[in-house]
Image (tube, rainbow, N blue to C red):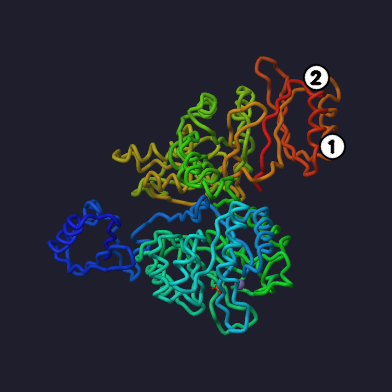
Amino acid sequence: MIVVLAKDISPHDAEMVRLYLKDRGFTVRDQAFGDAALLGAAGKGQMDIRELSLLPGVERVAATSKPYELASRETRSEDSIVSIGPVKIGGARISVIAGPCAVESREQIAETAAMVRESGAVMLRGGAYKPRTSPYAFQGLGMKGLEYMKAAAELYNMPIVTEVVSPELAEKMKELTDMFQIGARNMQNFELLKKVGSLGKPVLLKRGPSATIEEWLLSAEYLLASGTRDVVLCERGIRTFETYTRNTLDISAIPVVKALSHLPVIVDPSHAVGIRDKVAPAALAAIAAGADGLTIEVHPNPDAALSDGPQSLYPAQFESLMRDIEALSPVVGKELLRTPNIDVSASAGRASAVVSEKIAFSGESGAFAEQALIRAFGEEAARLQTDSFNAVFDAVLDGSAAFGVIPLENSLVGSVHENYDLLIRYPDIAISGEIKLRIVHCLIANKDATLDSIKIVRSHPQGFAQCRDFLAGHPDWQLETWSNTASAVMSIAQEAGKDAILSVAAIASESAAKAWCLKTLKTGVETDPRNYTRFVIIARRQGDGVRIPPSMGQQTPDKASLVFSVKDEPGSLYRCLKILSEEGINLSKLESRPILGQPWNYMFYVDVSIPESGDVFEKALAKFKAQAGNFNFLGRYRASL
Ligand code: PEP
Ligand code: MN
């Protein structure tokens, strides 16, 4: 067992912790690891770990059956999320790091930073000190290279990650880098691990070319035991008998490590395969296998690269890969996180100013809308739970929430009409972002219930509709409608003591089952696995504009939503839509809703794409406004793939 003590623990409190352990039959050993104060306790003593972790000055207690304790999932069941300035790795996001193998010049690194950022990379990579197999190969520009990289990062607001090859250099580099990389060749350089861990900065730990998963996790343990809390693991291929590729990408290591450890795992497909045209398939496989992100070599001119040119992507290839990753991520329940719109140098203050504002959603903990909210605003976002969509609009209007997250349509059952109607009833509110979430429904019940004991199923009507085929197989089940899927789950948790509860189940998300500590009887009960809900982020209008969620601020809007009515006469709708057609504007959705108090008159909603070229859209919009009645511009935002 390892007891991590707070850095500022008083000698008295430290002694109390030692006595507590000794009194309970443990032998205690002080373990100095860099700046970190640790106690190792061995023996067959008996004690309550929770009580120990509550003692003053105790930061964390790790007691596991594994030799790596701080890195083990047994000591921390939730996924760790590592922050590098405003960038996060882990959780429900995919974070992509990109850049050249080595920094070659001020211009090269700046040019690469601009390109990879434009495609959505959140961090810049690049080696200033290169551990090369041959002593005659380019060894990197050293501190000068790091300075060039820092300058590029500041220009483009991206944190940087760079390899550190010796304890002495770690000290010199610490002010300039945001994250240290421990290269594959140095994974078991224990003095380097201890030094880098003691500096407290985030660390990207590559897997050694011949390291087992356990050795890799023990190296992570060195870093964690030395003081840093922020370690990201990176699978980069291992050495096998296969020589076609540079290394063999160990895809299975991803789910294995995710089960053994709470640390985020990313993949470096570039060094794994070593061949440019194999990088994208390997990258997509890594995301599909559960990786939290990627680090990819991209060079503005790979043919002239001083190192690893053959495996470096051309910027256009990287751009195309990023679009594929964006489309794939929702399938594994994640979202590609693009560059946050935050100034890195002022990150701490500005980032927390954003997350301290509330974001409203309708439902209980574990609601799908909450998952969409986390995708858009991060796990720390302060949430305002409401019990209706109406209340979400009210909260955004009166300022008790900065943003709201509401569902607009589902790919299996169609539109959420109530929210289309609310968008008209609240003209001061506009759409400022979009999130598409894959919806996997589960049948959730009390831990002692079985499929045979179920007689009643609770959910939101959308939940029932999306699971129609599964429910049709159980015609004797009685369906009870609840205001949202997560509140149906909550009701079971709250009635836990009652005998009748064994006959009740709910249809909702796995997260709701976890949030309310209930059992999942069956996963994936939706009629088709391609089940997605499109959520929009709403905000109060400010003049002509509207606030954009920070994670979406860098992206040029490419979609707009409009609502309008037309005269009750032949060709009136056609004349409006013709304008879009003539201007080459693609219409992605058309929906009509009855107008309150005007039977058989309709409001039409359209979603259109905004062409890249200049003022085409503005011109079309002006013509459209002149033609349509009751025109309202609902918002301009970035489409979620
Ligand atoms: C690198 O990422 O630049 C690198 C040298 O990778 P690895 O340590 O995985 O070989
Ligand atoms: Mn390289």
Q: Is residue 246 left or right of residue 316?
A: left
Give residue 607's position: percent from left, percent from top. 72, 36
Choose the circle earlier in sequence order: 1 or 2: 2
Who is closer to the viewer here, 80 or 351?
A: 351
Graded by Cα atoms within 10 Å as few (under 14), some (14 to 19) or many (20 or more), the crowding at tag 2 reads few
User: In the drawing, what numbered circle is on residue 581?
Assistant: 1
- The residue to which callout 2 is attached is 567
Image side of residue 591 versus residue 92, left or right: right
SS for tag 1?
helix
Q: Are marks 1 and 2 in contact (CB under 8 Å)?
A: no
Q: Quarter for ligand 2? A: bottom right
The image shows residue 447 at horizontal and vertical percentages of 35, 49
Identified at 77% across, 21% down, the residue is 629
Left or right of residue 259: residue 577: right
Alpha carbons under labels 1 and 2: distance apart: 20 Å
The amino acid type of the residue labelled 1 equals: Ser
Direction left: furthest residue: 23
Figure check: 370 above or below 261: above
Q: Is residue 254 visible?
A: yes
**Residue 572 falls in which quadrant of the image?**
top right
